[in-house]
Image (tube, rainbow, N blue to C red):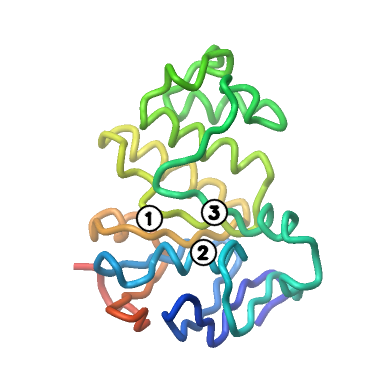
Amino acid sequence: MGVNDFEATELRYGGFGPVSFVMRKGEILGVKGPSGCGKTRLLRALADMDPWEGEMVLEGRAPGTMPASQWRRRVAYLPAESQWWFDGVGEHFCGAPDSAALCALGLEPEVLGWPVARLSSGEKQRLGLLRTLINRPAVLLLDEPTAHLDAARAKAFETLVAARCAEGMMALWVAHDPEQLARVTTRGYRMAAGGVWKEAEAWT
């Protein structure tokens, strides 16, 4: 394993697994499988949000060598529906998102001054991505991230993630759409009932 890699070995979580894989700097790894096979549970375990057993190492360091909050900034989880806990959009950002990224996702800077209640599901998800990227994660865990987006917005989302991975970020992308996985991923895995894990030769 290289110094910039992310590796999970014999990972077991919530009755699922074992899962083992290595992800290298710049890769987008895809994961596909039926509902209930443990895909979301896997992402939450990788982010150290749920109990797990096995080994995980990012850039030579295990989760236990740093505070949980630091690991979750480095291995960042974006759920299918992003979470919002303050009334205002801007209150959720630790810094101003990149204006070019805002524009690329079809958002105007004024959206940061809006109340969260004004946002559509798609706007929440695009802003959730920008909020996560501000922390410059080494690994981005994506759980059906474009489910609430139309085709044009989904393409913009894909393009932004791909651009960040071209700069060195790694991403694990869970999706049901084989065409999307074929577009965005470098390689991938299929999951079956119980979290059975095998490399995918093709998405279709």
Q: Which residue was labeled with disc 3?
A: 77
Q: Which residue was labeled with disc 2?
A: 27
| Marks 3/1: CA–CA distance | 18 Å
**Res. 193 image quadrant:** bottom left
| Element type at mark 2 | loop
**Res. 150 image quadrant:** top left
The N terminus lies in quadrant: bottom right
| Marks 1/2: CA–CA distance | 10 Å
- Image height of 92 relative to 170, above or below: above
Q: Earlier in the sequence, mark 3 or mark 2?
A: 2
**Res. 29 image quadrant:** bottom left
Instruction: Estimate how packed mark 1 is, as few (under 14), some (14 to 19) or many (20 or more) residues with alpha carbons within 10 Å.
Output: some
The image shows residue 177 at horizontal and vertical percentages of 24, 56
Q: Which residue was labeled with disc 1?
A: 184
| Marks 3/2: CA–CA distance | 16 Å
Instruction: Estimate how packed mark 3 is, as few (under 14), some (14 to 19) or many (20 or more) residues with alpha carbons within 10 Å.
Output: many
